[in-house]
Amino acid sequence: MNRYVWILLFVLGLVAPFVVYPVFMMKLLCFALFALAFNLLLGYTGLLSFGHAAFFGGASYITGHLIRNSGLTPELGILGGTLFAALLGYLVGSLAIRRQGIYFAMVTLALAQIVYFIALKAPFTGGEDGLQGIPRGFLFGLIDLNRVHVVGGKPLALNLYYFVFAVFCLGFWIIYRTIHSPFGQVLKGLRENEPRAVSLGYKVDRFKLMAFVISSAIAGLAGATKALVFQLASLTDVSWHTSGEVVLMTLLGGVGTVLGPLAGAFTVVTLQSELTSVGAWITVIIGGIFVICVLLFRRGFVGELGRLLKRSL
Amino acid sequence: MELSFQTVMSQVMLGLNNGVFYAILSLGLAVIFGLLNIVNFVHGALYMLGAYVALLGYTMLGPLLGKPDFHLNYWAALIVAPLVVGLLGVGVERTMLRRLRKFDHLYGLLLTFGLALIIQGVFTNYFNVSGDAYEAKPEALNGAVNLGFMMFPKYRLWVIAISLLVCFATWFVIERTKLGSYLRAGTENPELVKAFGVNVPLMITLTYGYGVALAAFAGVLAAPIYSVSPVMGSEMIITVFAVVVIGGMGSIMGSIVTGLLLGMVEGFTKVVYAPASSTVIFLIMVIVLLVKPAGLFGRES
């Protein structure tokens, strides 16, 4: 893709906190990263995981616990959460790839439900309340993530924002490199025609598992970062609603496009924050978008745009 | 804790009571999957809808029609709720699912997931998440029966009996009748069946309608036992998915038997180690995936 588009997006990311509410931006970045990670599986490997909230939310609990109760610095806490998500991804992935297609989706959903039950019942998760009051602390023990800069009369949490932005860029870069590597080409190959990939001698299960682990680790990175931003790890983060939401973001933006998950996350997060007044109707609206999306534009925003411009975005 | 025969048996019987719900719901999923090749995510929401048809038919239908004395009684609800939900299903199949037939089967899952969110969302807005009690349980089913080893509520015994009857009747129709042979042939090769002059699209629509009607039927049966709440379906459907993964959706009898067995195992776990009872089905799923990945009754396609 055009390098100017990347530069433009990067600059937008840098100036965003001065234009829109930083907490909204950070939430957006976390969910966009989550959707990007999910898209690596659905869009580039052809595996529909219906349990990705387990990695997102699981990592946010672990990170919250490490920072709050073990007193780790934020970057170590996030690293811990991400490693946990990778390990969990390895376990869930090795089980789920034993079944295909629709069964894969059901297996991941059911396994994620075990994680949900653990989050509900385990002694350190705070049950229904979740983990509250996770301190942001000092990055590398030096930079105060709570510090607020006053710009033009407005208090802005710039330290935290740029840290989150850096995490996002790192995650995005890893996914981008994965997609455009020979490894990513094999993934696309087995998405298109698995028997053929097998006949060419690829050990498809290993590729699927590797993709699953990378995807769950990045989903965990996103969840861990979100725990730091909101100072909260909650049951919602591990619930099937969240698993469904990330599917919607990816579908809406465009499955199998690099920028689709960004567009999808932007749409869904904006809807959620604009429509807080409608209360539980938001579930109905999200469901309605799902239905419309599946029936009318299965390629998503970016996919349809790419079709108009006749190039892959 | 001491494992007396009585405590074990009473929990296993209560488990069997849950098991018949798993059986009816996974049976419906299997029937739908056989012909439409989609996993009907909205199944749980329609189970919940069935329970609400019974509840609202009893409490609100009369006042709504201007006849405050009119109540839709339990027996009528057992017929009306499956009809209403079945018709809704026919509408959904005709207007939406049909259009997805030529695309990846995952889209069917996503579409029905969206429908489940819509239905659940609407009910969450109007009703209490902690649930309302259904108070129209018929007089005749109050009280308990002595089974020799324990006293068992009459109503639950009725639920077990009627559910087993419905499950096996469905099995009989599909596996042992001419109509069923069309259905099975349609599962194997719809094009060929069409060539013989069978109206396959109609068959698919009615199958979907019947599958979701089963879910509503289960919902009505559940209404007097559990409180009727907007989330009763979503909790159920995830467990039923695990049941379906364990049994495999390829076999009608397989899905019935797996549902019943897992309900009893869950009940038994409540006696042995109660905290594990909510996850035991998922753990069994893990073991089955490790030992026999295609599922107990499944054949890998």
Image: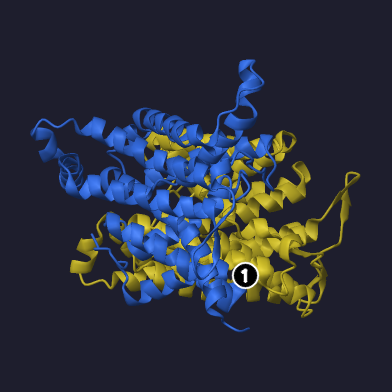
Chain colours: A yellow, B blue
Q: Position of residue A262 (x, y in %)?
A: 55, 48
Residue B166 visible in the current orientation: yes
Residue placed most toward the observer, B228 or B31: B228
Task: Give the structural element (helix, strand or loop) at label 1.
Answer: helix
| Left or right position of B237 against B247 | right
Residue placed most toward the observer, B185 or A205: B185
| Left or right position of B212 against A229 | left
Crowd class of label 1 (few under 14; some 14 to 19; many from 20; radius 10 Å): some
Three-letter amino acid code at the position of disc 1: Ile
Q: Is residue A232 above or below residue B209?
A: below
Extreme residue toward the top, this view: B66
Q: Position of residue B288 (x, y in %)?
A: 37, 72
Q: Quadrant of residue A237?
A: bottom right
Extreme residue toward the bottom, this view: B2
Q: Is residue A182 above or below residue B221?
A: below
Q: Name the residue rendered at 49%, 58% in the picture.
A: B17
Residue A40 visible in the current orientation: no
Q: Name the residue rendered at 57%, 59% in the picture.
A: A53
Looking at the rendered image, the quarter that the N terminus of chain B falls into is bottom right
Residue indicated by mark 1: A118
Extreme residue toward the left, this view: B196
Q: Name the residue rendered at 75%, 67% in the picture.
A: A126
| Left or right position of A310 against A202 | right
Looking at the rendered image, the quarter that the C terminus of chain B falls into is bottom left
Residue placed most toward the observer, B125 or A20: B125
Q: Quadrant of residue A193?
A: bottom left
Q: Name the residue rendered at 10%, 30% in the picture.
A: B197
Q: Position of residue B113 (x, y in %)?
A: 48, 44
